[in-house]
Image (cartoon, helix red, strand yellow):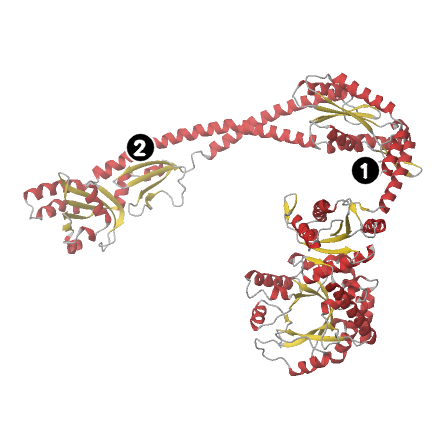
């Protein structure tokens, strides 16, 4: 595969090189043509720049002669202005002259024609545009245009020629002459450029704001970024840009260059093809001499030559590996020529897939192979490499209709470039192999492996023999070893003791010395399932491996994995339980790193002590698990078994006894909480909730009751009871009260028992209730964890018309991506989300996203735990269809629900009912 990729890369590189070389003449010619045309454009620009300056500063500059006259007349007759009318009169007769002004100092002394501009006489310089002030400042000719004077009633576009009168650097006044725009542009003659095949653009920089002001152009919307430019000053900066209409390279020239490059490229491609063909022919001839025809690997001659080339170049050591499939000739008689051919053809690919560094591979004879790798390895790495590669030479043989595998034995050595000779290195390696094989007795080796197994070593492998009979015996031992390991006392994944080993070890401790005290510490990783769910099981395993490594420090060989993410350690130390628990917490202060990921872990620790908290391993295990369960339920990080836990256990026993009696005597209470349909402002649904009296006028926590029922195998009986009671109430009062749907919680244990769908449908059917009025609610996290098993059951229930609600949404996974794949009809958003929407905009955005995703997937949305009017208002605005919570009503017995619903919905205050 790597060679094929390399050949493809080489061909692509050759084609790219041909393309580049073929394009070079075209690029060079293009640059030359463009350079010639640009030089022509530079000459044209020089001519036009000089022409424009000559026209502006000389030929069309009538202001200059008037300024000279003004200077003379002001010296001789400073108080008389008739001279200006006389001097400018002949100019105004010309059609291109629009007006002429004379400023004496900063005051307009004369404005011609008088009938149009006479009323401006006496105006100050500041009453006109900035260009008049600029002329005063620069004390030289200023040309501005095209502009429209704000005092010109005819709104003529003109070019202004302003010439200051200066004596010994002192400003005396200025003459302004305006020429018609079209006349000025005609005199410049830019249209001749377009006639010559050039687009042009004449523009200047507006001195007040620095903006570009286009004076004239050949065509609109032309990009002059590649044009030739010339710049001159009047005194503002003017720029003339030109470029050929068809571009610096004409279409004909482009086509010619493309054809030239194509012809040149075709010639180069032909030469490359002929050269490649010659190389392939030479390679084929070489392969016939150096390559084994059955495998495609080198034969001995070819491998020796290739290894010799390697040894002559470079300084990296070369690892040489020899493999021999002893009994190969005997084996191929069993497998036949077709299977042998397939085996030989696949060897090259298997070697190529295993080795990632540069290597050589050859077949020396029928069952022996040799491999050279350019890589420096230590003894362990050579052994691991040889063992791994030997598996690629594994030959399958069927004996007595049973698969057997013939392993390759191996020998390896290191060659040093410049020191070893290829032929001698190969011969020495093969010679060393046969000397070692002759000294090894398969029976003695098998005996040694059995002894190692008896001593407790776990890495013994019975599969290194090449003789078929020895291989069969080795396989028998191997099967026996696996059976023993399966019955052993260790967790094979994490190499740690399991629950039976804990019971055995603690029993031995107690039996050996009943007075010896020891402590048990149970460590549980909080919310560990999220790592498997959000990442992968392999990430979860890596985390558990690191947990095991850290816990091995204080507990050593007395460490056990008794459940998925629960570890148990035995300590013989007399140190207090609080101190040991604190040290265990310190072990997990640093996050666990897996690859590039970092995971901060939270742990719960439970502890108990022998013999105070139990005299047998079973009692100790029960008590420490009770302590751990108490830590989870109370949210504590550390729980040490004590009298409080004893009381909790007695309380649980009391609850369990009362629950059994209540179910058996049918005295267990079922309450109902109505659910508001916002669109109709009516209570159209209700949820059935279990209530177990505590004998003191109150009730046990429903969560505690259900948890105990699940742990003690009562959940199915409890669920059937609630379902039967709720359906009976719905059948009797549902239509009268307007209850269209009754929600009933479903435990995962009810869902996964055999024929659960049929059983549930039978209970509903016997009550006489339409299944379409029943909604079974299942917790989100439980559904996701059991989705594969639960999907089929839920599918049957939905086919019968029963609705399925995803309860507590927002507590567990809360991923919107999987909603379309879940077998549910209703989302019930948990109180933990709804209570945050008033203070957290992110939670409100999440609520709206859930509602939108539910709408897309045709799901109904119920918001649970709504307690205030503010929450009700914002949840209503988010588009939720149903609301359930204390804002509308608390859970109540059936008779109170009947009275409540007869009153109809009312407007609620902030105080929940």
Q: Quadrant of residue 879?
A: bottom right
Q: Is residue 796 visible?
A: no
Mark 1 is surrounded, within 10 Å at the Cα level, by few (under 14), some (14 to 19) or many (20 or more) other residues, namely: few
Left or right: 890 in relation to 43:
right
Q: Nearer the viewer, residue 711 or 852?
A: 711
User: Image height check: is 348 above or below 899?
Assistant: above
- The spot of residue 472 in percent (x, y) is 91, 35
Q: CA distance from mark 1 to mark 2?
A: 91 Å
The circle on residue 459 is: 1
Mark 2 is surrounded, within 10 Å at the Cα level, by few (under 14), some (14 to 19) or many (20 or more) other residues, namely: some
Residue at 41 percent across and 29 percent down: it is 35
Residue at 43 percent across and 37 percent down: it is 246
Q: Quadrant of residue 611?
A: bottom right
- The spot of residue 894 in percent (x, y) is 72, 79
The circle on residue 46 is: 2
Q: Nearer the viewer, residue 596 or 392?
A: 596
Left or right: 404 in relation to 88:
right
């Amino acid at each position: 595969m790597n060679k094929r990729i390399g050949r493809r890369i080489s061909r692509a590189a050759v084609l790219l090189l041909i393309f580049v070389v073929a394009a070079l003449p075209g690029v060079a010619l293009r640059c030359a043509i463009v350079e010639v045309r640009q030089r022509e454009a530079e000459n044209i620009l020089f001519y036009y720049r000089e022409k424009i300056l000559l026209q502006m500063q000389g030929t069309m500059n009538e202001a200059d002669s008037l300024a000279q006259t003004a200077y003379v007349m002001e010296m001789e007759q400073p108080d008389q202005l008739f001279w200006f009318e006389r001097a400018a009169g002949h100019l105004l007769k010309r059609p291109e002259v629009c007006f002429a002004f004379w400023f004496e100092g900063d005051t307009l002394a004369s404005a011609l024609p008088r009938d149009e501009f006479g009323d401006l006489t006496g105006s100050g310089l500041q009453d006109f545009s900035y260009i008049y002030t600029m002329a005063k400042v620069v004390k030289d000719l200023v040309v501005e245009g095209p502009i429209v004077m704000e005092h010109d009633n005819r709104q003529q576009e003109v070019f202004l020629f302003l010439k200051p009168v200066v004596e010994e650097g002192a400003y005396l006044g200025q003459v302004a002459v305006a020429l018609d725009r079209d006349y000025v542009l005609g005199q410049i003659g830019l249209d001749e450029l377009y006639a010559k095949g050039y687009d042009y653009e004449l523009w200047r920089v507006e001195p007040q704001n620095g903006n570009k002001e286009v004076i004239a152009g050949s065509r609109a919307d032309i990009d002059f970024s590649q044009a030739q430019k010339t710049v001159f000053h009047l005194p503002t900066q003017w720029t003339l840009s030109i470029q050929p209409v068809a571009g610096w390279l004409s279409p004909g020239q482009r086509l010619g260059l493309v054809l030239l490059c194509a012809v040149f490229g075709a010639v180069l491609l032909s030469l490359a093809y002929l050269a490649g063909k010659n190389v392939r022919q030479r390679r084929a001839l070489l392969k016939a001499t150096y390559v084994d025809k059955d495998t495609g690997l080198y034969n001995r001659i070819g491998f020796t030559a290739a290894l010799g080339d390697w040894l002559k170049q470079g300084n990296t050591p070369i690892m040489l590996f020899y493999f021999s499939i002893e009994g190969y000739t005997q084996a191929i008689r069993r497998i036949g020529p077709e299977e042998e051919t397939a085996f030989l053809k696949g060897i090259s690919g298997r070697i190529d897939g295993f080795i990632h560094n540069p290597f050589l591979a050859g077949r020396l004879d029928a069952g022996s192979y040799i491999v050279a790798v350019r890589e420096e390895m230590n003894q362990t790495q050579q052994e691991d490499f040889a063992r791994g590669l030997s598996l690629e030479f594994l030959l399958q043989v069927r004996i007595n209709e049973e698969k057997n595998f013939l392993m390759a034995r191996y020998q390896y050595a290191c060659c040093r470039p410049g020191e070893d000779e290829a032929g001698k290195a190969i011969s020495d390696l093969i010679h060393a192999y046969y000397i070692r094989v002759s000294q090894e007795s398969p029976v003695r080796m098998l005996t040694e492996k059995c002894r190692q197994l008896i001593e407790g070593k776990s890495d013994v492998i019975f599969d290194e023999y090449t003789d078929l009979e020895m291989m069969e015996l080795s396989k028998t031992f191997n099967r026996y070893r696996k059976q023993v390991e399966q019955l052993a006392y260790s967790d094979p994944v994490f190499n740690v003791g399991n629950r039976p080993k804990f019971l055995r070890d603690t029993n031995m401790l107690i039996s050996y010395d009943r007075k010896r005290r020891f402590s048990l510490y149970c460590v549980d990783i909080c919310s560990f399932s999220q790592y498997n769910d959000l990442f992968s099981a392999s990430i979860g395993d890596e985390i558990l491996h690191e947990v095991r490594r850290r816990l091995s420090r204080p507990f050593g060989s007395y460490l056990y994995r008794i459940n998925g993410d629960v570890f148990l350690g035995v300590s013989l130390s007399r140190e207090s339980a609080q101190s040991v628990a604190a040290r265990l917490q310190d072990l997990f202060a640093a996050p666990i790193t897996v690859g590039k990921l970092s995971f901060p872990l939270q742990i719960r620790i439970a502890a108990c002590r022998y013999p105070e908290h139990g005299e047998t391993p079973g009692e100790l295990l029960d008590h420490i698990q009770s302590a751990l369960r108490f830590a989870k339920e109370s949210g504590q990080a550390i729980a040490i078994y004590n009298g409080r836990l004893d009381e909790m256990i007695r309380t649980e026993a009391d609850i369990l006894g009362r629950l059994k009696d209540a179910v058996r005597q049918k005295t267990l209470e079922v309450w109902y909480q109505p659910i508001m349909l916002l669109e109709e402002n009516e209570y159209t649904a209700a949820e059935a909730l279990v209530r177990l009296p505590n004998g003191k006028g109150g009730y046990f926590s429903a969560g505690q009751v259900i948890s105990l029922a699940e742990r003690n195998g009562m959940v199915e009986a409890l669920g059937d009871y609630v379902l039967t009671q709720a359906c009976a109430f719905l059948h009797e009062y549902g239509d009268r009260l307007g209850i269209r749907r009754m929600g009933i919680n479903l435990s995962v244990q009810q869902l996964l028992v055999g024929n659960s769908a049929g059983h549930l449908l039978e209970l509903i059917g016997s009550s006489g209730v339409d299944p379409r009025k029943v909604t079974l609610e299942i917790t989100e996290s439980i559904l996701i964890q059991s989705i594969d098993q639960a999907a089929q059951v839920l599918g049957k229930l939905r086919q019968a018309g029963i609705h399925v609600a995803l309860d507590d949404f927002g507590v567990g996974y809360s991923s919107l991506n999987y909603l379309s794949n879940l077998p549910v009809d209703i989302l019930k958003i948990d109180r933990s989300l709804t209570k945050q929407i008033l203070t957290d905009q992110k939670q409100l955005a999440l609520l709206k996203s859930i509602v939108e995703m539910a709408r897309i997937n045709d799901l109904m949305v119920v918001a649970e735990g709504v307690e205030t009017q503010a929450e009700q208002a914002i949840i209503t605005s988010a588009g939720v269809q149903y609301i359930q919570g204390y804002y509308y009503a608390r859970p109540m017995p059936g008779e109170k629900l009947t009275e409540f619903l007869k009153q109809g919905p009312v407007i609620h205050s902030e105080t929940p009912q």
